Image (cartoon, coloured by chain):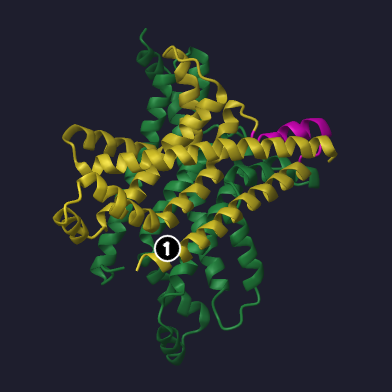
Chain colours: A green, B yellow
């Protein structure tokens, strides 16, 4: 049997890993984006009390390597009585870490908005949550789509770190196959292909949002 | 944590620093060369480098590190962990740096080239005396940003057993059975390294805005 045939016969392992990676990526991308949006919403308004703690959280995350946060949640927290499975620890780490990055991207874009928008909305009787949801948020999403796309690709790549805290994802699949059959080259080429596929898919998705944005008058964003 | 634990942490920090430092130095230079080759648009080389950049940007560092470390012996190459880690980090950061350099090239004004050639500079003298100093200044913020990304990605080398600042926390907690203090200490050390770079970046940006008018 050639090396490729061995890989084909164990395709279940790859597909399971691919499915796990996609699942981790999908769930954490959505939750991290929501977390980032909530943080930006909390910074909204004239005198947000949460400004300083949020600033510390966001900047702290931006200075930390992702693996250290994953270590902290998986190895560190049990000693204060919080025990999570590797999968949940990994997911929580992804959401917290990338939520901070999303918040920073959105906040950076938020500061470029003209003040008049908010004033006009307030004059029309919008409440703060409705104003954010209807006016600020859609604009933020369409304007930051390029940076968001980059961040999503970084998120995808960070899921591979979770192999170190024993999550069974795509890289773990390649690692275990290559050590079982001694075919590292082929196993990793397949896995890198999978990652490439997801990235290209993501880029297409961002382009699609761009086209939708252009239709609604955001082509210069 | 006792003094031996702090000693181990310092050793890990040093490993992270020198592995990242070497990768950054090679990566910035190789990135410039790759960008130059891409700008020259040599038929086959252009497509090959384009594919390399697209692939390297999509491949997670952990996967790349494992790939290189496990594949090298099957091709008859005998490389140790540190070298495999450095190669992986360099391959990754080169792709990003090449894009930063290339965008600086593309934004460079063509009039300067015409003027330089008109007064009799050779293309090489023009590149070294006129173009390189200016694109170095405009690329610096992006390059420093990529450097901090590299340091944040460097724990990937832990997966092949390099005892860097991330992995050293496992060693310490294997003795003390208290994982939290070493992880927090390592986190603080990473924060110091990154904030040093961020400070350098701010310095570079201030200098860039003063020099590149």
- Residue bearing mark 1: B208
User: How far across and how far down the image is residue A36, in percent?
Assistant: 52, 62
Pick whichever, B125 or B110, lies toward us: B125
Label 1: few (<14), some or many (≥20) within 10 Å?
A: some
Q: Is residue B167 magenta?
A: yes
Please check the rendered image and state whether residue B189 is part of the magenta-colored stretch, yes or no: no
Is residue B9 visible in the rendered image? The answer is: yes
Residue drawn at the location 79% of the way across and 37% of the way down: B5
In the displayed image of the protein, which residue is found farthest to the front?
A: B120
Pick out the residue farthest to the right.
Answer: B2
| Vertical side of B122 occupied by B82: above or below | above
The residue shown at (55%, 61%) is A35
Quarter of the figure with the C terminus of chain B: bottom left
Q: Position of residue B36 (x, y in %)?
A: 27, 43
Report the magenta residues as a range.
Answer: B164-179
As drawn, which residue projects farthest toward the left?
B118
Percent coordinates x, y for residue A191 in the rendering: 41, 29
**Looking at the image, which is closer to me, A136 or B128?**
B128
Taking the image as shown, residue A74 lies to the left or right of residue B99, namely right
Residue A21 seen in render: no
């Amino acid at each position: 049997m050639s090396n490729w045939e061995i890989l084909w016969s164990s395709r279940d392992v790859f597909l399971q890993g691919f499915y796990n990676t996609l699942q981790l990526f999908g769930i954490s991308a959505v939750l991290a984006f929501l977390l980032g949006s909530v943080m930006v919403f909390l910074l909204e308004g004239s005198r947000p009390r949460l400004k300083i703690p949020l600033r510390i959280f966001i900047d702290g995350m931006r200075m930390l390597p992702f693996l250290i946060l994953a270590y902290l949640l998986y190895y560190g927290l049990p000693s204060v009585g919080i025990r999570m499975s590797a999968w949940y620890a990994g997911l929580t780490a992804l959401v917290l870490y990338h939520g901070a990055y999303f918040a920073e991207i959105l906040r950076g874009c938020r500061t470029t908005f003209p003040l008049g928008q908010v004033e006009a909305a307030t004059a029309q009787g919008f409440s703060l949550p409705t104003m954010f949801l209807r006016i600020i948020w859609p604009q933020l999403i369409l304007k930051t789509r390029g940076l968001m796309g980059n961040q999503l690709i970084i998120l995808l790549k960070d899921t591979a770190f979770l192999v170190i805290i024993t999550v069974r994802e795509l890289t773990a699949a390649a690692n275990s196959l290559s050590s079982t059959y001694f075919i590292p080259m082929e196993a990793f080429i397949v896995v890198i292909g999978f990652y490439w596929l997801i990235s290209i898919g993501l880029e297409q998705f961002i382009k699609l949002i761009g086209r939708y944005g252009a239709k609604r008058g955001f082509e210069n964003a | 944590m006792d003094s031996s634990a702090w000693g181990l942490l310092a050793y890990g920090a040093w490993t992270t620093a020198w592995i990242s430092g070497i990768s950054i130095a090679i990566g910035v230079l190789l990135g410039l060369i790759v960008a130059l080759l891409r700008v020259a648009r040599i038929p086959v080389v252009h497509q090959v480098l384009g594919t390399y950049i697209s692939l390297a940007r999509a491949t997670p560092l952990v996967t790349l590190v494992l790939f290189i470390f496990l594949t090298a012996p099957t091709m008859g190459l005998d490389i140790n962990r540190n070298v495999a880690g450095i190669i992986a980090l360099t391959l990754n950061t080169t792709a990003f740096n090449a894009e930063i350099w290339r965008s600086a090239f593309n934004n460079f004004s063509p009039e300067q080239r015409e003027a330089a050639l008109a007064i009799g500079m050779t293309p090489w003298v023009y590149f070294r005396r006129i173009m390189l100093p200016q694109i170095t200044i405009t690329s610096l913020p992006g390059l420093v940003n990529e450097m901090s990304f590299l340091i944040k990605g460097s724990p990937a080398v832990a997966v092949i057993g390099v005892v860097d600042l991330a992995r050293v926390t496992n060693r310490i907690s294997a003795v003390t059975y208290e994982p939290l203090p070493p992880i927090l200490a390592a986190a603080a050390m990473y924060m110091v390294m990154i904030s040093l770079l961020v400070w350098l970046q701010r310095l570079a940006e201030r200098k860039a805005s003063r020099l590149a008018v």
